[in-house]
Amino acid sequence: MRFTSLTSSDGVTEQLFTLGEIPGVLWTPEGAPGPRPLILMGHGGGQHKKAPGVLARAHRFVTEGGFAVAAIDAPNHGERPKNEELDRIATEHQARIAAGEDTATLVAALQALAARQAVPEWQAVLTALQELGQVGAGPVGYWGVSMGCGLGVPLVAAEPRVGAAVLGLQGSPALAEAATRITVPVRFLVQWDDERVPRAHSLALFEAFASAEKTMHASPGKHGDLPRSEAEDTLRFFTRHLG
Amino acid sequence: MRFTSLTSSDGVTEQLFTLGEIPGVLWTPEGAPGPRPLILMGHGGGQHKKAPGVLARAHRFVTEGGFAVAAIDAPNHGERPKNEELDRIATEHQARIAAGEDTATLVAALQALAARQAVPEWQAVLTALQELGQVGAGPVGYWGVSMGCGLGVPLVAAEPRVGAAVLGLQGSPALAEAATRITVPVRFLVQWDDERVPRAHSLALFEAFASAEKTMHASPGKHGDLPRSEAEDTLRFFTRHLG
Protein backbone atom coordinates (compact mmCIF):
# COMPACT_ATOMS: atom_id res chain seq x y z
CA MET A 1 0.00 0.00 0.00
CA ARG A 2 1.53 3.22 -1.19
CA PHE A 3 0.35 6.56 0.21
CA THR A 4 0.36 9.37 -2.31
CA SER A 5 -1.01 12.29 -0.30
CA LEU A 6 -1.94 13.31 3.22
CA THR A 7 -4.18 16.27 4.05
CA SER A 8 -6.31 17.25 7.04
CA SER A 9 -9.42 19.39 7.36
CA ASP A 10 -12.18 19.78 9.94
CA GLY A 11 -10.56 17.21 12.23
CA VAL A 12 -10.32 14.53 9.52
CA THR A 13 -7.05 13.25 8.05
CA GLU A 14 -7.39 12.05 4.46
CA GLN A 15 -4.78 9.75 2.92
CA LEU A 16 -4.92 8.80 -0.75
CA PHE A 17 -3.34 5.44 -1.53
CA THR A 18 -2.87 2.83 -4.20
CA LEU A 19 -2.65 -0.90 -3.64
CA GLY A 20 -1.40 -2.42 -6.86
CA GLU A 21 -3.74 -0.84 -9.40
CA ILE A 22 -6.49 0.01 -6.89
CA PRO A 23 -6.81 3.70 -5.99
CA GLY A 24 -8.27 4.34 -2.56
CA VAL A 25 -8.68 6.79 0.28
CA LEU A 26 -8.54 6.43 4.05
CA TRP A 27 -10.12 8.90 6.46
CA THR A 28 -9.24 8.87 10.18
CA PRO A 29 -9.62 11.32 13.07
CA GLU A 30 -6.84 13.91 12.94
CA GLY A 31 -4.09 13.30 15.48
CA ALA A 32 -5.45 9.94 16.66
CA PRO A 33 -2.80 7.29 16.04
CA GLY A 34 -4.40 4.29 17.78
CA PRO A 35 -6.56 1.47 16.36
CA ARG A 36 -10.29 1.94 15.79
CA PRO A 37 -13.23 0.22 14.05
CA LEU A 38 -13.11 0.51 10.26
CA ILE A 39 -15.96 1.09 7.82
CA LEU A 40 -15.51 0.14 4.17
CA MET A 41 -17.67 2.36 1.99
CA GLY A 42 -18.78 1.25 -1.47
CA HIS A 43 -19.85 4.02 -3.86
CA GLY A 44 -22.79 3.96 -6.31
CA GLY A 45 -22.71 3.32 -10.05
CA GLY A 46 -21.11 6.14 -12.02
CA GLN A 47 -19.63 7.58 -8.80
CA HIS A 48 -16.14 7.22 -7.32
CA LYS A 49 -14.28 6.94 -4.01
CA LYS A 50 -14.63 10.66 -3.21
CA ALA A 51 -18.13 11.29 -4.55
CA PRO A 52 -19.89 13.99 -2.47
CA GLY A 53 -22.17 11.52 -0.65
CA VAL A 54 -19.28 9.21 0.25
CA LEU A 55 -17.15 12.13 1.43
CA ALA A 56 -19.90 13.66 3.57
CA ARG A 57 -20.78 10.34 5.19
CA ALA A 58 -17.12 9.48 5.78
CA HIS A 59 -16.45 12.82 7.51
CA ARG A 60 -19.47 12.31 9.69
CA PHE A 61 -18.51 8.75 10.66
CA VAL A 62 -14.97 9.89 11.50
CA THR A 63 -15.85 13.02 13.49
CA GLU A 64 -19.01 11.81 15.25
CA GLY A 65 -18.27 8.08 15.53
CA GLY A 66 -14.48 8.01 15.78
CA PHE A 67 -14.33 5.42 12.98
CA ALA A 68 -11.74 4.95 10.27
CA VAL A 69 -13.44 4.96 6.84
CA ALA A 70 -12.00 3.69 3.56
CA ALA A 71 -13.27 3.85 -0.02
CA ILE A 72 -11.81 2.56 -3.28
CA ASP A 73 -12.72 3.21 -6.90
CA ALA A 74 -14.81 0.25 -8.05
CA PRO A 75 -13.77 -1.49 -11.27
CA ASN A 76 -14.39 0.78 -14.26
CA HIS A 77 -15.00 3.82 -12.03
CA GLY A 78 -13.09 6.92 -10.88
CA GLU A 79 -9.40 6.73 -11.71
CA ARG A 80 -9.60 3.09 -12.86
CA PRO A 81 -8.88 2.27 -16.52
CA LYS A 82 -12.01 1.43 -18.46
CA ASN A 83 -12.78 -2.28 -18.77
CA GLU A 84 -14.26 -2.65 -22.25
CA GLU A 85 -16.78 -5.34 -21.39
CA LEU A 86 -17.97 -3.55 -18.23
CA ASP A 87 -18.07 -0.28 -20.11
CA ARG A 88 -20.18 -1.68 -22.92
CA ILE A 89 -22.69 -3.14 -20.46
CA ALA A 90 -22.78 0.08 -18.39
CA THR A 91 -23.41 2.21 -21.47
CA GLU A 92 -26.21 -0.11 -22.58
CA HIS A 93 -27.60 0.03 -19.04
CA GLN A 94 -27.76 3.84 -19.00
CA ALA A 95 -29.44 3.85 -22.43
CA ARG A 96 -32.06 1.34 -21.33
CA ILE A 97 -32.79 3.23 -18.08
CA ALA A 98 -33.23 6.40 -20.16
CA ALA A 99 -35.63 4.48 -22.42
CA GLY A 100 -37.60 3.25 -19.40
CA GLU A 101 -36.80 -0.41 -20.11
CA ASP A 102 -36.36 -3.25 -17.65
CA THR A 103 -32.63 -3.55 -16.98
CA ALA A 104 -32.61 -6.30 -14.33
CA THR A 105 -30.78 -8.89 -16.44
CA LEU A 106 -28.17 -6.40 -17.55
CA VAL A 107 -27.59 -5.18 -14.01
CA ALA A 108 -27.16 -8.74 -12.80
CA ALA A 109 -24.57 -9.44 -15.52
CA LEU A 110 -22.76 -6.19 -14.79
CA GLN A 111 -22.64 -6.81 -11.08
CA ALA A 112 -21.52 -10.41 -11.37
CA LEU A 113 -18.63 -9.35 -13.59
CA ALA A 114 -17.70 -6.43 -11.36
CA ALA A 115 -18.01 -8.45 -8.14
CA ARG A 116 -15.61 -11.11 -9.41
CA GLN A 117 -12.99 -8.36 -9.50
CA ALA A 118 -14.18 -6.12 -6.67
CA VAL A 119 -14.47 -8.70 -3.87
CA PRO A 120 -10.79 -9.80 -3.89
CA GLU A 121 -9.77 -6.16 -4.31
CA TRP A 122 -11.68 -5.10 -1.18
CA GLN A 123 -10.22 -8.09 0.69
CA ALA A 124 -6.64 -7.13 -0.26
CA VAL A 125 -7.28 -3.49 0.70
CA LEU A 126 -8.76 -4.58 4.03
CA THR A 127 -5.71 -6.71 4.81
CA ALA A 128 -3.37 -3.79 4.05
CA LEU A 129 -5.47 -1.29 6.05
CA GLN A 130 -5.51 -3.52 9.12
CA GLU A 131 -1.71 -3.37 9.22
CA LEU A 132 -1.82 0.40 9.75
CA GLY A 133 -1.42 1.73 13.27
CA GLN A 134 -4.36 4.14 12.92
CA VAL A 135 -6.71 1.30 11.87
CA GLY A 136 -5.59 -2.01 13.37
CA ALA A 137 -7.27 -5.41 13.25
CA GLY A 138 -10.47 -4.44 15.08
CA PRO A 139 -14.13 -4.58 14.03
CA VAL A 140 -15.02 -3.90 10.39
CA GLY A 141 -18.30 -2.72 8.84
CA TYR A 142 -19.43 -2.25 5.26
CA TRP A 143 -21.68 0.58 3.93
CA GLY A 144 -22.96 0.49 0.35
CA VAL A 145 -26.25 1.11 -1.47
CA SER A 146 -27.26 0.71 -5.10
CA MET A 147 -24.10 -0.55 -6.88
CA GLY A 148 -22.38 -0.40 -3.49
CA CYS A 149 -24.91 -3.03 -2.36
CA GLY A 150 -24.56 -5.04 -5.57
CA LEU A 151 -20.84 -5.41 -4.85
CA GLY A 152 -21.28 -5.39 -1.08
CA VAL A 153 -23.54 -8.43 -0.80
CA PRO A 154 -20.96 -10.79 -2.37
CA LEU A 155 -18.20 -9.10 -0.35
CA VAL A 156 -19.96 -9.42 3.01
CA ALA A 157 -20.92 -13.02 2.17
CA ALA A 158 -17.30 -13.89 1.37
CA GLU A 159 -15.42 -11.91 4.02
CA PRO A 160 -15.67 -13.03 7.64
CA ARG A 161 -13.90 -9.92 8.94
CA VAL A 162 -16.96 -7.78 8.09
CA GLY A 163 -19.15 -7.82 11.21
CA ALA A 164 -22.07 -5.55 10.24
CA ALA A 165 -23.39 -4.06 7.00
CA VAL A 166 -25.61 -1.26 5.75
CA LEU A 167 -26.99 -2.21 2.33
CA GLY A 168 -29.94 -1.27 0.12
CA LEU A 169 -31.38 0.40 -2.98
CA GLN A 170 -30.88 -2.95 -4.68
CA GLY A 171 -33.01 -6.02 -5.24
CA SER A 172 -31.32 -7.97 -8.01
CA PRO A 173 -32.49 -11.61 -7.71
CA ALA A 174 -28.91 -12.55 -8.69
CA LEU A 175 -27.82 -11.41 -5.22
CA ALA A 176 -30.17 -13.71 -3.32
CA GLU A 177 -27.82 -16.68 -3.10
CA ALA A 178 -25.00 -14.60 -1.59
CA ALA A 179 -27.52 -12.94 0.75
CA THR A 180 -28.43 -16.33 2.23
CA ARG A 181 -24.79 -16.67 3.32
CA ILE A 182 -24.81 -13.36 5.25
CA THR A 183 -25.39 -13.79 8.98
CA VAL A 184 -24.02 -10.52 10.44
CA PRO A 185 -26.37 -7.67 11.46
CA VAL A 186 -27.77 -5.93 8.39
CA ARG A 187 -29.53 -2.58 7.97
CA PHE A 188 -31.34 -2.63 4.62
CA LEU A 189 -32.47 0.68 3.09
CA VAL A 190 -35.41 0.76 0.67
CA GLN A 191 -36.90 3.68 -1.24
CA TRP A 192 -40.60 2.91 -1.52
CA ASP A 193 -40.98 4.51 -4.96
CA ASP A 194 -37.61 3.41 -6.36
CA GLU A 195 -37.87 3.73 -10.14
CA ARG A 196 -34.92 1.36 -10.66
CA VAL A 197 -35.61 -1.40 -8.16
CA PRO A 198 -39.00 -3.16 -8.16
CA ARG A 199 -40.41 -3.08 -4.64
CA ALA A 200 -41.00 -6.83 -4.62
CA HIS A 201 -37.32 -7.38 -5.44
CA SER A 202 -36.22 -5.21 -2.50
CA LEU A 203 -38.50 -7.09 -0.11
CA ALA A 204 -37.27 -10.44 -1.46
CA LEU A 205 -33.61 -9.48 -0.98
CA PHE A 206 -34.32 -8.32 2.59
CA GLU A 207 -36.06 -11.64 3.16
CA ALA A 208 -33.04 -13.56 1.80
CA PHE A 209 -30.46 -12.36 4.36
CA ALA A 210 -29.80 -15.12 6.88
CA SER A 211 -28.98 -12.58 9.60
CA ALA A 212 -30.88 -13.01 12.85
CA GLU A 213 -30.58 -9.25 13.29
CA LYS A 214 -31.70 -7.38 10.21
CA THR A 215 -33.91 -4.33 9.84
CA MET A 216 -35.40 -2.81 6.73
CA HIS A 217 -35.93 0.95 6.69
CA ALA A 218 -38.31 2.03 3.92
CA SER A 219 -38.96 5.67 3.05
CA PRO A 220 -41.07 7.29 0.36
CA GLY A 221 -39.26 8.65 -2.66
CA LYS A 222 -37.19 7.60 -5.61
CA HIS A 223 -33.80 5.91 -5.93
CA GLY A 224 -31.88 9.12 -5.31
CA ASP A 225 -34.04 10.48 -2.50
CA LEU A 226 -32.65 8.59 0.52
CA PRO A 227 -33.51 10.79 3.55
CA ARG A 228 -30.68 12.43 5.47
CA SER A 229 -31.99 10.94 8.72
CA GLU A 230 -31.06 7.47 7.44
CA ALA A 231 -27.40 8.51 7.33
CA GLU A 232 -27.63 9.48 11.01
CA ASP A 233 -29.26 6.18 11.84
CA THR A 234 -26.52 4.17 10.13
CA LEU A 235 -23.87 5.87 12.27
CA ARG A 236 -25.71 4.60 15.36
CA PHE A 237 -26.09 1.17 13.75
CA PHE A 238 -22.32 0.88 13.37
CA THR A 239 -21.65 2.31 16.82
CA ARG A 240 -23.93 -0.37 18.27
CA HIS A 241 -22.40 -3.28 16.35
CA LEU A 242 -18.74 -2.28 16.01
CA GLY A 243 -18.29 0.01 19.05
CA MET B 1 -58.65 16.38 35.95
CA ARG B 2 -58.26 15.02 39.46
CA PHE B 3 -54.87 13.81 40.70
CA THR B 4 -55.06 10.82 43.04
CA SER B 5 -51.38 10.14 43.76
CA LEU B 6 -47.90 11.56 43.23
CA THR B 7 -44.71 9.52 43.55
CA SER B 8 -41.16 9.90 42.26
CA SER B 9 -38.44 7.39 41.46
CA ASP B 10 -35.28 7.40 39.37
CA GLY B 11 -35.78 11.03 38.39
CA VAL B 12 -39.35 10.50 37.17
CA THR B 13 -42.45 11.94 38.81
CA GLU B 14 -45.56 9.82 38.31
CA GLN B 15 -49.03 11.28 38.83
CA LEU B 16 -52.13 9.12 38.63
CA PHE B 17 -55.25 10.99 37.57
CA THR B 18 -58.84 10.58 36.52
CA LEU B 19 -60.67 12.73 34.03
CA GLY B 20 -64.34 11.92 34.38
CA GLU B 21 -64.32 8.14 34.18
CA ILE B 22 -60.94 7.89 32.43
CA PRO B 23 -58.04 6.69 34.60
CA GLY B 24 -54.64 7.91 33.46
CA VAL B 25 -51.05 8.54 34.42
CA LEU B 26 -48.62 11.37 33.70
CA TRP B 27 -44.84 11.01 33.90
CA THR B 28 -42.59 14.09 33.94
CA PRO B 29 -38.96 14.77 34.92
CA GLU B 30 -38.68 15.13 38.70
CA GLY B 31 -38.36 18.74 39.85
CA ALA B 32 -38.89 20.24 36.38
CA PRO B 33 -41.93 22.51 36.54
CA GLY B 34 -41.76 24.13 33.06
CA PRO B 35 -43.56 23.15 29.82
CA ARG B 36 -42.18 20.40 27.58
CA PRO B 37 -43.21 18.29 24.57
CA LEU B 38 -45.79 15.62 25.44
CA ILE B 39 -46.04 12.04 24.17
CA LEU B 40 -49.36 10.22 24.42
CA MET B 41 -48.75 6.51 24.74
CA GLY B 42 -51.40 3.98 23.71
CA HIS B 43 -51.09 0.49 25.20
CA GLY B 44 -51.65 -2.83 23.44
CA GLY B 45 -54.70 -5.08 23.62
CA GLY B 46 -55.14 -6.78 27.00
CA GLN B 47 -52.62 -4.36 28.56
CA HIS B 48 -53.18 -1.18 30.56
CA LYS B 49 -51.74 2.29 31.19
CA LYS B 50 -48.91 0.99 33.39
CA ALA B 51 -48.08 -2.23 31.52
CA PRO B 52 -44.33 -3.01 31.80
CA GLY B 53 -43.53 -1.97 28.21
CA VAL B 54 -45.39 1.32 28.55
CA LEU B 55 -43.72 2.05 31.88
CA ALA B 56 -40.19 1.27 30.65
CA ARG B 57 -40.62 3.37 27.49
CA ALA B 58 -42.17 6.26 29.43
CA HIS B 59 -39.28 6.34 31.93
CA ARG B 60 -36.80 6.33 29.08
CA PHE B 61 -38.57 9.13 27.19
CA VAL B 62 -38.74 11.24 30.36
CA THR B 63 -35.17 10.70 31.57
CA GLU B 64 -33.34 10.64 28.23
CA GLY B 65 -35.59 12.89 26.14
CA GLY B 66 -36.98 15.30 28.75
CA PHE B 67 -40.52 14.60 27.52
CA ALA B 68 -43.77 14.44 29.44
CA VAL B 69 -45.51 11.12 28.77
CA ALA B 70 -49.16 10.25 29.42
CA ALA B 71 -51.10 7.00 29.18
CA ILE B 72 -54.73 6.16 29.83
CA ASP B 73 -56.57 2.89 30.19
CA ALA B 74 -58.26 2.19 26.85
CA PRO B 75 -61.97 1.35 26.90
CA ASN B 76 -62.55 -2.06 28.46
CA HIS B 77 -58.94 -2.25 29.77
CA GLY B 78 -57.11 -1.72 33.08
CA GLU B 79 -59.31 -0.09 35.72
CA ARG B 80 -62.14 0.63 33.25
CA PRO B 81 -65.49 -1.10 33.74
CA LYS B 82 -66.08 -3.87 31.23
CA ASN B 83 -68.12 -2.87 28.21
CA GLU B 84 -70.21 -5.93 27.44
CA GLU B 85 -70.13 -5.59 23.67
CA LEU B 86 -66.37 -4.94 23.55
CA ASP B 87 -65.81 -7.72 26.02
CA ARG B 88 -67.77 -10.24 23.98
CA ILE B 89 -65.79 -9.36 20.83
CA ALA B 90 -62.46 -9.40 22.65
CA THR B 91 -63.17 -12.83 24.13
CA GLU B 92 -64.14 -14.16 20.73
CA HIS B 93 -60.96 -12.60 19.30
CA GLN B 94 -58.69 -14.35 21.79
CA ALA B 95 -60.43 -17.68 21.13
CA ARG B 96 -60.03 -17.32 17.39
CA ILE B 97 -56.35 -16.36 17.67
CA ALA B 98 -55.82 -19.43 19.84
CA ALA B 99 -57.55 -21.51 17.16
CA GLY B 100 -55.32 -20.03 14.47
CA GLU B 101 -58.26 -18.44 12.63
CA ASP B 102 -58.32 -15.25 10.62
CA THR B 103 -59.54 -12.51 12.94
CA ALA B 104 -59.29 -9.48 10.64
CA THR B 105 -63.02 -8.73 10.49
CA LEU B 106 -63.42 -9.10 14.24
CA VAL B 107 -60.43 -6.87 14.93
CA ALA B 108 -61.82 -4.21 12.63
CA ALA B 109 -65.19 -4.28 14.39
CA LEU B 110 -63.56 -4.18 17.79
CA GLN B 111 -61.30 -1.28 16.90
CA ALA B 112 -64.04 0.76 15.26
CA LEU B 113 -66.16 0.43 18.38
CA ALA B 114 -63.28 1.20 20.71
CA ALA B 115 -62.03 4.13 18.61
CA ARG B 116 -65.43 5.83 18.69
CA GLN B 117 -64.98 6.05 22.45
CA ALA B 118 -61.19 6.33 22.71
CA VAL B 119 -60.59 9.23 20.31
CA PRO B 120 -62.72 11.81 22.16
CA GLU B 121 -61.32 10.48 25.47
CA TRP B 122 -57.72 11.08 24.36
CA GLN B 123 -58.72 14.53 23.07
CA ALA B 124 -60.27 15.51 26.40
CA VAL B 125 -57.25 14.20 28.30
CA LEU B 126 -54.90 16.11 25.98
CA THR B 127 -56.81 19.35 26.57
CA ALA B 128 -56.60 18.88 30.35
CA LEU B 129 -52.89 17.93 30.28
CA GLN B 130 -51.99 21.01 28.26
CA GLU B 131 -53.36 23.21 31.03
CA LEU B 132 -50.77 21.82 33.46
CA GLY B 133 -47.63 23.89 34.12
CA GLN B 134 -45.31 20.87 33.75
CA VAL B 135 -46.77 20.07 30.29
CA GLY B 136 -48.07 23.22 28.56
CA ALA B 137 -49.43 23.68 25.06
CA GLY B 138 -46.27 22.64 23.17
CA PRO B 139 -45.62 19.87 20.63
CA VAL B 140 -47.47 16.56 21.02
CA GLY B 141 -46.56 13.09 19.74
CA TYR B 142 -48.37 9.76 19.81
CA TRP B 143 -46.79 6.31 20.36
CA GLY B 144 -48.87 3.16 19.92
CA VAL B 145 -48.46 -0.25 18.30
CA SER B 146 -50.87 -3.16 17.86
CA MET B 147 -54.13 -2.01 19.51
CA GLY B 148 -52.34 1.25 20.32
CA CYS B 149 -52.02 1.73 16.55
CA GLY B 150 -55.59 0.62 15.90
CA LEU B 151 -56.81 3.41 18.19
CA GLY B 152 -53.94 5.74 17.31
CA VAL B 153 -54.59 5.98 13.59
CA PRO B 154 -58.11 7.44 14.03
CA LEU B 155 -56.81 9.66 16.85
CA VAL B 156 -53.90 11.11 14.88
CA ALA B 157 -56.17 11.56 11.84
CA ALA B 158 -58.71 13.48 13.93
CA GLU B 159 -56.45 15.50 16.23
CA PRO B 160 -54.43 18.36 14.72
CA ARG B 161 -52.42 18.90 17.93
CA VAL B 162 -50.54 15.61 17.35
CA GLY B 163 -47.47 16.49 15.28
CA ALA B 164 -45.67 13.14 14.91
CA ALA B 165 -46.58 9.49 15.49
CA VAL B 166 -44.96 6.11 16.02
CA LEU B 167 -47.38 3.40 14.92
CA GLY B 168 -47.22 -0.23 13.78
CA LEU B 169 -47.88 -3.94 14.40
CA GLN B 170 -51.22 -3.34 12.70
CA GLY B 171 -52.53 -3.56 9.17
CA SER B 172 -56.30 -3.64 9.45
CA PRO B 173 -57.73 -2.51 6.08
CA ALA B 174 -60.41 -0.70 8.13
CA LEU B 175 -57.71 1.80 9.17
CA ALA B 176 -56.74 2.78 5.62
CA GLU B 177 -59.25 5.60 5.23
CA ALA B 178 -58.11 7.34 8.43
CA ALA B 179 -54.47 6.77 7.42
CA THR B 180 -55.00 8.76 4.24
CA ARG B 181 -55.91 11.76 6.42
CA ILE B 182 -52.63 11.60 8.37
CA THR B 183 -50.00 14.02 7.10
CA VAL B 184 -47.62 14.36 10.07
CA PRO B 185 -44.29 12.45 10.21
CA VAL B 186 -44.91 8.75 10.89
CA ARG B 187 -42.57 5.98 12.02
CA PHE B 188 -44.24 2.65 11.19
CA LEU B 189 -42.97 -0.54 12.88
CA VAL B 190 -43.45 -3.92 11.22
CA GLN B 191 -42.54 -7.39 12.45
CA TRP B 192 -41.68 -9.36 9.32
CA ASP B 193 -43.04 -12.64 10.69
CA ASP B 194 -46.03 -11.18 12.54
CA GLU B 195 -48.43 -14.06 13.15
CA ARG B 196 -51.36 -11.68 13.71
CA VAL B 197 -50.89 -9.13 10.93
CA PRO B 198 -50.53 -10.31 7.30
CA ARG B 199 -47.41 -8.72 5.82
CA ALA B 200 -49.32 -7.38 2.82
CA HIS B 201 -51.71 -5.60 5.20
CA SER B 202 -48.81 -3.92 7.02
CA LEU B 203 -47.28 -2.74 3.75
CA ALA B 204 -50.66 -1.47 2.53
CA LEU B 205 -51.24 0.53 5.72
CA PHE B 206 -47.76 2.07 5.47
CA GLU B 207 -48.56 2.92 1.86
CA ALA B 208 -51.84 4.58 2.90
CA PHE B 209 -50.39 7.30 5.18
CA ALA B 210 -50.47 10.64 3.36
CA SER B 211 -47.39 11.85 5.28
CA ALA B 212 -44.57 13.17 3.13
CA GLU B 213 -42.22 11.98 5.85
CA LYS B 214 -42.87 8.38 6.81
CA THR B 215 -40.48 5.50 7.40
CA MET B 216 -41.22 1.83 7.85
CA HIS B 217 -38.86 -0.18 10.06
CA ALA B 218 -39.24 -3.92 9.52
CA SER B 219 -37.50 -6.51 11.68
CA PRO B 220 -37.63 -10.29 11.70
CA GLY B 221 -39.72 -11.91 14.38
CA LYS B 222 -43.26 -12.29 15.60
CA HIS B 223 -45.84 -9.82 16.89
CA GLY B 224 -44.32 -9.70 20.37
CA ASP B 225 -40.65 -9.62 19.34
CA LEU B 226 -40.17 -5.90 18.57
CA PRO B 227 -36.40 -5.28 19.02
CA ARG B 228 -35.24 -3.07 21.86
CA SER B 229 -33.26 -0.92 19.40
CA GLU B 230 -36.54 0.26 17.88
CA ALA B 231 -37.50 1.83 21.20
CA GLU B 232 -34.23 3.80 21.15
CA ASP B 233 -34.88 4.91 17.59
CA THR B 234 -38.36 6.19 18.42
CA LEU B 235 -36.92 8.43 21.14
CA ARG B 236 -34.72 10.07 18.50
CA PHE B 237 -37.69 10.26 16.12
CA PHE B 238 -39.66 12.29 18.67
CA THR B 239 -36.65 14.42 19.58
CA ARG B 240 -36.23 15.28 15.90
CA HIS B 241 -39.89 16.15 15.30
CA LEU B 242 -41.04 17.56 18.64
CA GLY B 243 -37.77 18.95 20.04
Image (cartoon, coloured by chain):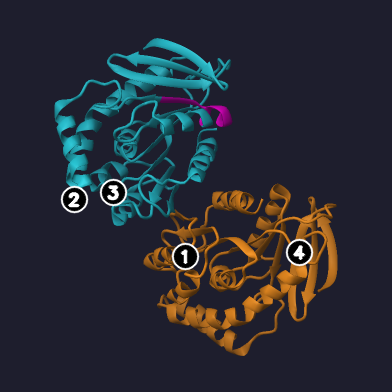
Chain colours: A cyan, B orange
Q: In this rendering, do the residues under marks 4 and 2 share a single chain?
A: no
Specify the label residue A101 is tagged with.
2
Where does the magenta region start and end?
A61-70
Mark 1–mark 2 Cα distance, whole angstroms, equals 30 Å
Q: Is residue B219 above or below residue A165?
A: below
Q: Which residue is mark 1?
A: B209
Tell me, yes or no, if residue B34 can be seen here.
Answer: yes
Q: Is residue A68 magenta?
A: yes
Task: Kindly identify which chain the residue marked by label 2 belongs to.
Answer: A
Q: Amino acid at mark 2?
A: Glu
Q: Amino acid at mark 3?
A: Arg
Mark 1–mark 3 Cα distance, whole angstroms, equals 23 Å
Q: In this rendering, do the residues under marks 4 and 3 share a single chain?
A: no
Q: Which residue is mark 4?
A: B26
Callouts 2 and 3 close, C-beta under 8 Å: no
Task: Kindly identify which chain the residue marked by label 3 belongs to.
Answer: A
Task: Kindly identify which chain the residue marked by label 1 belongs to.
Answer: B
Q: Is residue B75 magenta?
A: no
- At x 42%, y 53%, the residue is A218
